[in-house]
């Protein structure tokens, strides 16, 4: 038996165990998805992909042993490989059996909760003995039987025979087989390797969980914990403050009253536009479109003629600031209404992968269908996993566009995006179905690709940031033009807002002047106005939710501009630094450093005396956000 045959047999061992585990879940939970419109049999095909990714990683060590081991240690290598496989396959069997009660309990495959329990062996052992004794005994029996047959039946002769093959022949196989394993582990020839998001192919949550691979899911959780093991105390590097004190300071700072829980920001906010016919909501998030490019928001002339024109028809939030400098921070800001959590973005955090507040969970009880529409691959930044895990009904991404007119490096063009979105909204409206959607553009992303003959390139340079923004503006204009022709327009609130600016320039500790973004609210019944107060992305979300006409309970860290509770502030994240902008003052906190206070005048930070109370407020915000995430209280 040669190297390839040996590795293939190991691969099939693992795939067989994974398949049996998936089949068991499929049968056990069949009633949960048997009436869905999706072809649920595809779970085995998509699941095979997830299994292959996992198996290819595990096969790296057998590959090295079989191809690189010298003949003189063939016996040692053979024994090592035999027991390596025994350990791996035993772990796989255990995980597959443990998945069954875990899914029963949490309705998901083993994830960060499973990993966290490993830190409490006594408690978890008692829980297993009391609640899952049958499963534990089954696992022990299965592992004992498997181990017995494996040890007695698995012969090392075949491994020895492979290692006895000429060394040069085996070494020459190493690189090509390694390449195959790497490609199998990546499971993608695109910019990014596949991840858990790729298991979310169905709108049915149970089907998606069955599709996943438990070992891969656990591995992902461990990886996050290793690289972000300070999540629990991440805010502590900015200073110390009692959590209850911090949350009370935040409630005072943000003017949040009548909360139901001490450690919660959730409260009832009554609409200033109450109606028996709540409106739809469409958020059109613009990639990297800073206010400095938009004339209507004090920016450069000639780049955004469509937004400039539309600004005369809607509410111009003149001084809106982004949460941070990355799309993943802006997405959370406009859909979940929370400021940037210290450390890794919420989109990639395990504890925010489900039951984390956003517009989907908020509006679902009112009969809304929710969607995320994106021209690129939705697995980028773990977006798809986050949206579907937190209740979005539908995710439309690049692969779902039929015959797009233009496909660039990052996906289909914004022109195709707005056409597809308009069609989706028309269909929902025809069924009298309320909807809320996040559309995400990607034109303003290097290498700045967009279709020909749609705009006149800015200053004659086609592949430039400003030309790409001009095309994104063109798509905004086309979308509103299409929407105005449809029935749903009169029943919908639209907001055009950027995720963040691009190229944060300047020598200030935090370049506050680079954080302003355009935010424009449109709709048939919208009275044109300009709001000059400081507005955050959470404020924008609170404002559009106010305009749809529902009294809502939510934990959003902001207020509608029509509320007398609205505060003139925003929290900005710049790498590991945080800046609280309040009126004309800025406090900046950095890890391991004391807070510093500035005056913000003429778009510059001017040192001034410490404002100790404002510095405490800034720290309180970070500790509160971190606590709400870690204790899963933002819901």
Image (spheres, grey):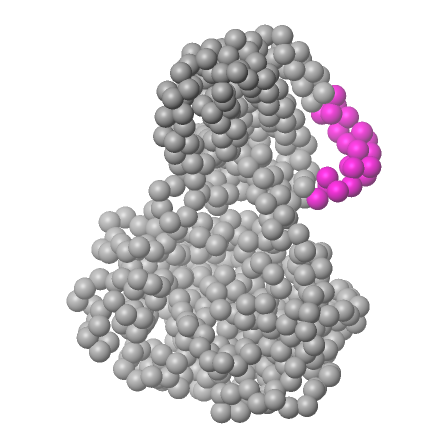
The span shown in magenta is 116-137
Closer to the camera in the image, 305 or 13:
13
Q: Position of residue 94 (x, y in %)?
A: 65, 26
Q: Is 629 rendered above or below residue 193? A: below
Q: Quadrant of the C terminus?
A: bottom right
Decide: is 321 above or below 419: below
Within the magenta stretch, is there residue 135? yes
* Left or right of residue 630, residue 36 in this image: left
How many labels sit on residues?
0
Residue 303 on the magenta segment: no
How far across and how far down the image is residue 324, in percent? 52, 70
Q: Tell me which secondary structure the magenta stretch mostly adopts.
A: helix
User: Residue 514 or 505: which is nearer the viewer?
Assistant: 505
Asked if 517 appears above or below 73 in the picture, the reply is below
Instruction: List the single residue furthest toward the front.
Output: 72
Of 75 and 138, nearer the camera is 75
Would you say 140 lies left or right of 490 here?
A: right
| Residue found at x 75% / y 42% | 119
Indicate left or right for 27 with 597 as reference: left
Q: What residue appears at the point 60 percent right and 73 percent down from the top-left corner?
A: 578
Give the percent coordinates (x, y) of residue 517: 45, 76
Residue 263 x, y percent position in the rendering = 75, 64
Front-most of residues 624 and 495: 624
Q: Quadrant for the N terminus, please.
A: top left
Rendered residue at 35%/42% (across/down): 189
């Amino acid at each position: 038996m040669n190297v390839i045959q040996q590795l293939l047999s190991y691969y099939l061992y693992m795939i067989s165990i994974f398949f049996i585990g998936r089949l068991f879940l499929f049968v056990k939970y069949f009633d949960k998805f048997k009436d869905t419109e999706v072809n649920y049999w595809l779970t085995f095909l998509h699941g095979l992909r997830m299994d292959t990714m996992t198996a290819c990683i595990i096969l790296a060590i057998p590959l090295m042993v079989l191809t690189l081991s010298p003949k003189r240690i063939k016996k040692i290598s053979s024994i090592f490989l035999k027991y390596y496989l025994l350990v791996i396959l035993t772990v796989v069997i255990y995980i597959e059996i443990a998945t069954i009660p875990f899914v029963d309990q949490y309705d998901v495959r083993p994830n960060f909760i499973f990993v966290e329990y490993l830190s409490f062996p006594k408690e978890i052992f008692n829980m297993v003995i009391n609640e899952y004794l049958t499963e534990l005994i089954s696992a022990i029996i299965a592992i004992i039987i498997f181990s017995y047959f494996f040890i007695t039946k698995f012969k090392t002769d075949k491994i020895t025979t492979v290692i006895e093959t000429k060394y040069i022949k085996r070494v020459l196989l190493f690189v090509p087989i390694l390449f195959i394993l790497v490609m199998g582990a990546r499971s993608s020839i695109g910019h990014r390797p596949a991840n858990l998001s790729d298991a979310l192919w169905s709108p049915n949550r149970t089907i998606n969980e069955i599709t996943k691979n438990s070992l891969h899911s656990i591995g992902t959780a461990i990886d996050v914990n290793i690289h972000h093991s300070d999540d629990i105390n991440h805010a502590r590097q900015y200073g110390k403050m009692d959590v209850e004190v911090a949350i009370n300071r935040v409630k005072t700072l943000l003017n949040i009253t009548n909360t139901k829980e001490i450690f919660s920001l959730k409260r009832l906010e009554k609409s200033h536009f109450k109606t028996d016919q709540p409106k739809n909501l469409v958020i059109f998030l613009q990639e990297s479109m800073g206010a400095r490019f938009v004339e209507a928001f004090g920016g450069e002339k000639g780049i955004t003629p469509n937004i400039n024109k539309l600004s005369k028809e809607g509410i111009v939030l003149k001084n809106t600031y982004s949460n941070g400098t990355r799309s993943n921070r802006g997405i959370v800001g406009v859909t979940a209404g929370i400021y940037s959590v210290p450390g890794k973005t919420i989109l990639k955090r395990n504890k925010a992968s489900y039951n984390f507040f956003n517009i989907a969970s908020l509006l679902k009880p009112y009969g809304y269908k929710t969607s995320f529409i994106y021209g690129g691959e939705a697995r980028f930044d773990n977006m798809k996993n986050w949206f579907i895990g937190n209740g979005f009904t539908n995710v439309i991404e690049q692969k779902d566009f039929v015959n797009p007119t233009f496909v660039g490096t990052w996906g289909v063009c914004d022109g195709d995006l707005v056409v597809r979105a308009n069609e989706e909204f028309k269909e929902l409206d025809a069924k009298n179905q309320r909807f809320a959607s996040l559309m995400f553009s990607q034109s303003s992303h290097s290498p700045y690709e967009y279709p020909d003959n749609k705009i006149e390139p800015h200053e004659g340079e086609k592949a430039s940031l400003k030309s790409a923004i001009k095309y994104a503006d063109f798509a905004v204009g086309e979308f509103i033009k299409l929407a105005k022709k449809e029935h749903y327009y009169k029943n919908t609130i639209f907001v055009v807002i950027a995720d963040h600016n691009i190229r944060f320039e300047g020598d200030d500790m935090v370049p506050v002047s680079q954080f302003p973004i355009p935010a424009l609210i449109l709709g048939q019944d919208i009275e044109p106005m300009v709001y000059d107060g400081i507005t955050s992305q959470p404020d924008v979300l609170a404002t559009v939710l106010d305009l749809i006409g529902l009294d809502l309970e939510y934990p959003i860290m902001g207020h509608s501009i029509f509320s007398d509770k609205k505060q003139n502030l925003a929290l900005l994240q710049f790498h590991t630094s945080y800046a609280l902008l309040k009126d004309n003052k800025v406090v900046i906190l950095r890890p391991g450093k004391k807070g510093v206070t500035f005056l913000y005048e003429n778009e510059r930070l001017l040192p001034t005396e410490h404002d100790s109370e404002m510095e405490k407020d800034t720290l309180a915000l970070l500790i509160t956000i971190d606590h709400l995430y870690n204790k899963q209280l933002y819901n």
